[in-house]
Amino acid sequence: MSIIKENDIAVGYKHSALGVIPEEWEVKKLRSVCLGKGEYGINAAAVEYSENLPAYIRITDIDDEGRFCLDKKTSVNNANADNFLLQINDVVFVRTGATVGKSYLYNENDGKLVFAGFLIRFRIDVSVVNEYFLWSYTKSKPYWDWVKTTSMRSGQPGINSLEYAALQIPYPKIQEQQAIANCLSEWDKTIEKLNSLITQKELRKKGLMQGLLSGKKRLKGFENKWNYKSLQKFLIYTPREVNKPIDLFLALGLRSHGKGIFHKPNFDPKAIAMDKLYMVKENDLVVNITFAWEQAIAIATKADEGGLVSHRFPTYTFSEEASPLYFKFFILGNRFKNMLDLISPGGAGRNRVMSKKDFLKLEVFIPEKKEQEAIANVLESIDKEIQLLKTKLDQMKLQKKGLMQVLLTGSKRLKY
């Protein structure tokens, strides 16, 4: 369609409370397209999930895509629970906390759901608005701009039912809403398939790690016996002490739960009192002795080369008997996490310091180097598959975000 601009507004468009929109579009408030008022959820404690009870949806049970998290379901056991059961065309909004603004459109495939007190339910009137179109708008940039402005008016992140009811939404004809909803729904189905495939691959990887790294599952061609050996057979303590830089430098940290090394670029040397730091190189095994019990351990990549750490992050190089790639996976296992826990005595948090002496004495059940390398190659292969899928997923999400921006503002029109 050819757009001729006049006074900075294209022909066929107009100014509105939501910015420039097509002339035939309206702007309506959420309350005008819903049945009744916004309702607050039940004030009840979660109990262990039971098939004999309805599942409980709380603010923590809605993921970043607006889906109900099925992996850690809980239930609610309350005499009034039936009054808070979600129905088809119900949408709930998070009303407080860091995730205020998140929404979930009820999906009957999620089963019976009772919504919690920090959620607000609106029942969409599908005779006047398409439920998927409305829900899709709650993932758009204009919506999140509104959330940011509205939620901080009181100084605390929160939006009440009256404020949500006053939310302004773009309102094309119902046929165009349906066309937009159908388009975005197809993208969501593709994204969901990718999410499902990634989950399947990650479960397969988990199963392979449990079997291959314990010796319970052997690769073809390997029959030699595994042995218990201390880590000092494979690791060499290798500190590379340097003077604290005068200028800004790359500092490194370690995430707990095996989440790897993170960067603190342009780190100000004045922020630390120590005069000596230690350099990390590619393929170093790095451990945070303060949080080793929480699996703060990783193997450095090329991107980490030259980064600096404190004395609380000892670095180790690998002997000729070890495959660094094998240990990349081995250190993420639950058994190794338990071993780190045992050599980190003390109370919680910073009082639990791993013994560097005991670390090298840890006994691990391990194959010869050739089998280590073969196992590592299998696991690395599936890791790369997962990473490719995640990259594709990120691209799909980014493209959908751009599509939402043009469809939900009317700057791009669909035939209907």
Image (cartoon, rainbow, N blue to C red):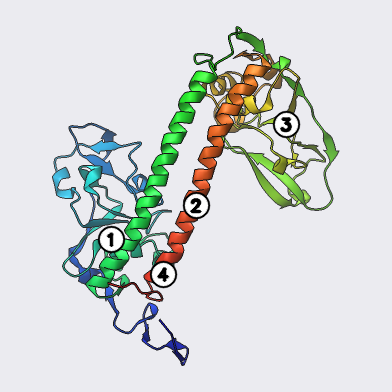
Please name the amino acid that badge 1 sits on.
Answer: Tyr
> Does dot 4 land on a helix, a strand or a loop?
helix
List the single residue furthest toward the bottom. Answer: 7
The part of the image, by quadrant, that contains residue 377 is top right
Please name the amino acid that badge 3 sits on.
Answer: Asp
Q: Which residue is mark 3?
A: 284
Q: Which residue is mark 4?
A: 142
Check contact, mark 2 vs mark 3: CB within 8 A: no
At x 41%, y 35%, the residue is 200
Q: Which residue is mark 2?
A: 394
Give percent across and percent down for residue 285. 69, 29
Q: Nearer the viewer, mark 4 or mark 2?
A: 2
Mark 4 Cα shell of 10 Å, populated few (<14), some (14-19), many (≥20)? some
Mark-to-mark CA distance, 2 and 3: 30 Å
Which sits earlier in the primary sequence, circle 2 or circle 3? 3
Residue 178 vs residue 28, the one in the foreground: 178
- Which quadrant would the N terminus be assigned to in this image? bottom left
Mark-to-mark CA distance, 4 and 3: 46 Å
